[in-house]
Amino acid sequence: MDKSELRKIPGVDTLMKDSKIKKLISEYGEELTVFSIRKVLSEIRDAVMKGKKLPQNDRILNRIRQKVYHIGTLSLKPMVNATGIVLHTNLGRAPLGSALTEEVVKIIEGYSNLEFDLEKGKRGHREDHITDLVTFITGAEDAVVVNNNAAGVFLSLSTFCSSKEAVISRGELIEIGGSFRIPDIMQQSGARMVEVGTTNRTRLSDYEAAITEETAVLFKAHKSNYYIKGFSEEVEIEALAELAHTNKLICIYDMGSGLLRKPKGLPLETEPDVQTALQSGADLVMFSCDKLLGGPQGGIIAGKKEYIQKLKKSPLMRVLRVGKMTLAALSEVIRCYLKDETLLENVPVFHMLDQTKDELRERAEKFSKLLKKEKIPNKIVKNTARCGGGTLPQVEIPSYAVQLDLSKTKLSPEQIYHKLLQLKKPILGILREGSLLFDMFTLDSGQIIEIAKQIKKMIQT
């Protein structure tokens, strides 16, 4: 370590006199600016002590500016999704769309009757705003909303299976993004997991043979983010529920993907839905709200009233309950399920899934012409869109994308790709094998105009 380098590190007072720092103070205040200076100087000091060279003064100032911006500006930004993945987990899964958010804003911008019964003139229950709606759409006897589907699994097992056995197929020990694993949740809930069958084949007799006096739950998990083809077999929920009830056990179905019911004409034939699962005898069905349901992050547990009432009285509900923003958005989305026309028109997930190839081709041609008008070579290519978000893994949706030809420009596809991500409203395209593409499936007409405008700026600058 060169101690002379440490002595060269500028002090806080010295940096405070710099015009760039003064500008930061005027915009973001002295307290945040000083905090950022000290944070950056501490990082530099640690690096120098490890043998690294002291950065130039301009780089130090730039790091301070970036630190101030990172804290003082909004890091969560609206984005343009040009990947063709509808439920893009990294982009927040289901978009709500303007038709729904306009109604939600009216609720969340001021006070609301979240826990106030207007008819009785006294305190009410927040779940009352959505229970009747969910039970009508799904056919459940009762329902409760928690902050995500994992919470639904945890709450149900903790309430009904603590220190007892939950029987599950080895082929359904799923893992989803963020390292959420069914075995881990079961362990944390206090349930004792009993695995039956094999990865590719599990029969009803496997469950039956595993039932003991310690068994409380027969558990089924929908393989929503993968599928097994070929020599495979699994037990349908109707048969599993019948076995559970014969042995006075609870049948719990972790559906995950959250399709409430199947609108006509969409590629959802192979996907289980909540309505059918409940009709088949499942006692509790839990599912995500921000996947195929098309709503905000949350989880719903729907099923038999006697079990849901016990869940509602659990002390854990205080930990897992959702707030007014989630309830407002969720109720608006689920209300759209009352009519297929409203669902397809107002819920973006279903609106996208309802697109025709002709509509996608027409949008691609419009985007291609916009780019060619600005002398940006491109071509329309066939592409495959996906539902994403851990849903419909086997469904490949034919789509069209526009691929840029940047061979005669100074910027590479990688450079354009990253520059688009640095915009005030970032644009995420597809960087594939050295080419940059924009899939039409998750774009609207206004967005393709904006993308063309931004690409023109970058190339012509």
Image: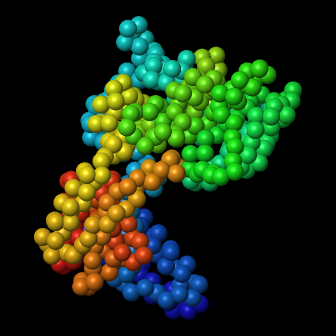
Q: Is residue 116 above or below residue 442?
A: above
Say which of 323 and 91 sits in front.
91
| Horizontal and vertical percent position of residue 256 | 56, 40
Query: Where the N terminus falls, by quadrant?
Result: bottom right
- Specify the farthest residue to the right: 213
In the rendered structure, the answer to whether residue 112 lies left or right of residue 171 reads left
- Specify the farthest residue to the top: 120
Query: Where the C terminus falls, by quadrant?
Result: bottom left
Residue at image point 65% right, 27% down: 238
Say which of 119 and 275 sits in front.
275
Asked where in the image residue 51 lies, by quadrant, the reply is bottom right
| Horizontal and vertical percent position of residue 23 | 25, 68
In the rendered structure, the answer to whether residue 385 lies left or right of residue 228 reads left
Q: Is residue 113 above or below residue 7?
A: above
| Horizontal and vertical percent position of residue 449 | 19, 60
| Horizontal and vertical percent position of residue 255 | 58, 37
Asked where in the image residue 220 lies, by quadrant, the reply is top right
Say if residue 156 shows up in the picture. Answer: no
Say which of 84 and 106 sits in front.
84
- Specify the farthest residue to the left: 373
Residue at image point 40% right, 33% down: 263
Q: Is residue 191 above or below residue 366?
A: above
In the rendered structure, the answer to whether residue 270 lies left or right of residue 413 reads right
Coloring scheme of the render?
Answer: rainbow
Asked where in the image residue 338 lies, by quadrant, the reply is top left
Residue at image point 76% right, 34% down: 204
Say if residue 383 shows up in the picture. Answer: yes
